[in-house]
Image (spheres, rainbow, N blue to C red):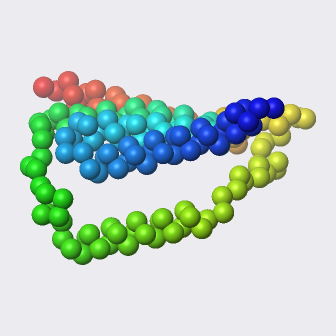
Amino acid sequence: MSTLTANGPAILFYVFAALALVSALGVVTLRNPMYGAISLLVTFLAVAALFLLRGAEFVGMVQIFVYGGGIMVLFLFVIMLINLHRLAEVKIFGGLSPLAAVVGVLLLAFFGFFFLHAQFAAPVANPDAFVMVGAEKLGNSQAVAWSLYTENLLPFEIASLFLLVAMIGAVVLGRRQ
């Protein structure tokens, strides 16, 4: 087995983790709100890729659909509604209190020390964490679906009815104009 295929998931983890960190920094440092929102979308998608790399397909897809889709659309509508073009320019330490600068440097030193001295190891998968149906182990998404449609069918259907009523109410309220 070559080195690239043996370390492929580790390399992908580091790439997506670095992308998530850089884009998260972009969310809080970019002056243009639209660029900040796009950077937030990149952060959401990088975190979803990290979930998918760890075998949590359901959580990764929920991250993409709920945060990458719904929440980002909401943020973009708010940005367009209030018509923010660009915030006022401030100097690096001009608008920053000395206490905030000291706390930022201390946090950076703490996290740097943590990452230099931490021992990172891949977690061992728990074989009992999966649902057994007959003699077959179900994967992550199949286990969630099995639980929703067998043991929790009534609460699932009640939640779907509440969402249907809310959707109809939103359409009725929106058409009153």
Q: Which residue is drawn at 71% across and 52% down?
A: 122
Residue 26 horizontal/vertical position (percent)? 32, 45
Residue 10 horizontal/vertical position (percent): 65, 43
For the C terminus, the quadrant is top left
Vertical relation: 147 (above or below) 99: above
Query: Which quadrant would residue 150 be assigned to in this image?
Result: top right
Depicted 102 relative to depicted 119: above or below: below
Residue 154 appears anywhere in the view: no
Q: Considering depth in this image, is 75 or 20 the residue closer to the camera?
A: 20
Question: What is the residue that sits farthest to the left in this orientation?
Answer: 88
Q: Is residue 11 visible?
A: yes
Assign the N terminus to one quadrant of the image. top right
Q: In this view, does 172 lie to the left or right of 121?
A: left
Q: Is residue 102 left or right of residue 159?
A: left
Q: Within the image, what quadrant is residue 104 found in?
A: bottom left
Front residue of 91/16: it is 91
Residue drawn at (43%, 69%), measured in percent from left and top? 109
| Total numbered badges shown on the rendered structure | 0
x, y (%) of residue 66?
44, 37
Taking the image as shown, residue 112 lies to the left or right of residue 130, namely left
Left or right for 134, reference 94: right
Question: Which sits in the foreground, 141 or 33?
Answer: 33
Q: Residue at x 29, y 51 (%)?
A: 28
The relative height of residue 81 versus residue 102 in the rendered view (above or below) is above
Q: Where is residue 132 in the image (x, y as percent from the top left)?
A: 83, 40
- Judged from this view, the residue extending furthest toward the right is 135
Q: Residue at x 12, y 55 (%)?
A: 90
